[in-house]
Amino acid sequence: MEPNHSTTAHTYNGMNDMSTPQPLTDLRKRVPEAKKLIADLLTGLLGPVELDYDFYREWNGCWKVRVTVQGKTTGTLDFTLLSTPSGGMLAIPRPLPERWRTQTGITANDGTVWTLDDAGNLIPFPHP
């Protein structure tokens, strides 16, 4: 009997794996990239801030970052790190503030913009 060589695309939140960012599981050599991405995002939204980073892995191997913000605005934000289909990096704040989700989206360092739909699925941000 001939082996079955057919492949089935796995889905992630109803979309093809290759069309949405996937959890970043290998952070080697990418820590400076993650720090710059988060610093650029927060500086653009909040103005000049001082940031402290705490990188850690979730149970599923995905990297997250807890960021402590100091400056005019203070607080703590958690980010999930994802790899975009083109190999860029996306840092999604968790929870994602509603204004960012509906009005601006989150820009990855490859220029793509992402958001969460009402069901919590990661989707490309619908530009007007």
Image (cartoon, helix red, strand yellow):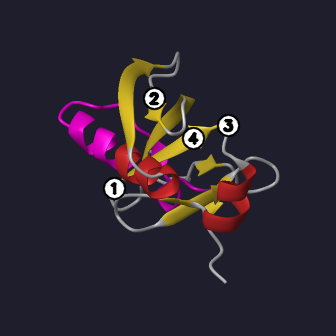
Q: Amino acid at mark 3?
A: Pro
Q: Which residue is mark 3?
A: 95
Q: Count residues near mark 1 (Cα–Cα under 10 Å), then give few for <14, some for 14-19, many for 20+.
A: some
Q: CA distance from mark 3 to mark 4?
A: 6 Å
Percent of width and height locating residue 9: 55, 54
- Which is nearer the N-term, disc 2 or disc 1? 2
Query: Please, what secondary structure does the residue beneath circle 1 have?
Result: loop
Percent of width and height locating residue 1: 47, 43
Q: Which residue is mark 4?
A: 93
Q: Which residues are magenta?
A: 15-37
Q: Nearer the viewer, residue 67 or 117?
A: 67
Q: Count residues near mark 4 (Cα–Cα under 10 Å), then give few for <14, some for 14-19, many for 20+.
A: many
Disc 3 and disc 4 in contact, CB within 8 angstroms? yes
Q: Nearer the viewer, residue 89 or 48?
A: 48
Residue beneath the point at 47% across and 32% down: 69
- Quadrant (top left, top right, bottom left, bottom right) of the C terminus: bottom right
Query: Please, what secondary structure does the residue beneath circle 3 have?
Result: loop
Percent of width and height locating residue 97: 69, 46
Query: Please, what secondary structure does the residue beneath circle 2 have?
Result: strand
Q: Amino acid at mark 4?
A: Pro
Q: Which residue is mark 1?
A: 88
Disc 2 and disc 4 in contact, CB within 8 angstroms? no
Can you tell which of label 1 and label 4 is closer to the viewer? 4
Q: CA distance from mark 2 to mark 1?
A: 20 Å
Residue ranking furthest to the top: 59
Indicate left or right for 116 with 47 as reference.
right
Q: Count residues near mark 2 (Cα–Cα under 10 Å), then give few for <14, some for 14-19, many for 20+.
A: many
Residue beneath the point at 54% across and 38% down: 73
Query: Please, what secondary structure does the residue beneath circle 4 have?
Result: strand
Can you tell which of label 2 and label 3 is closer to the viewer? 2
Q: Is residue 99 above or below residue 3?
A: below
Disc 2 and disc 1 in contact, CB within 8 angstroms? no
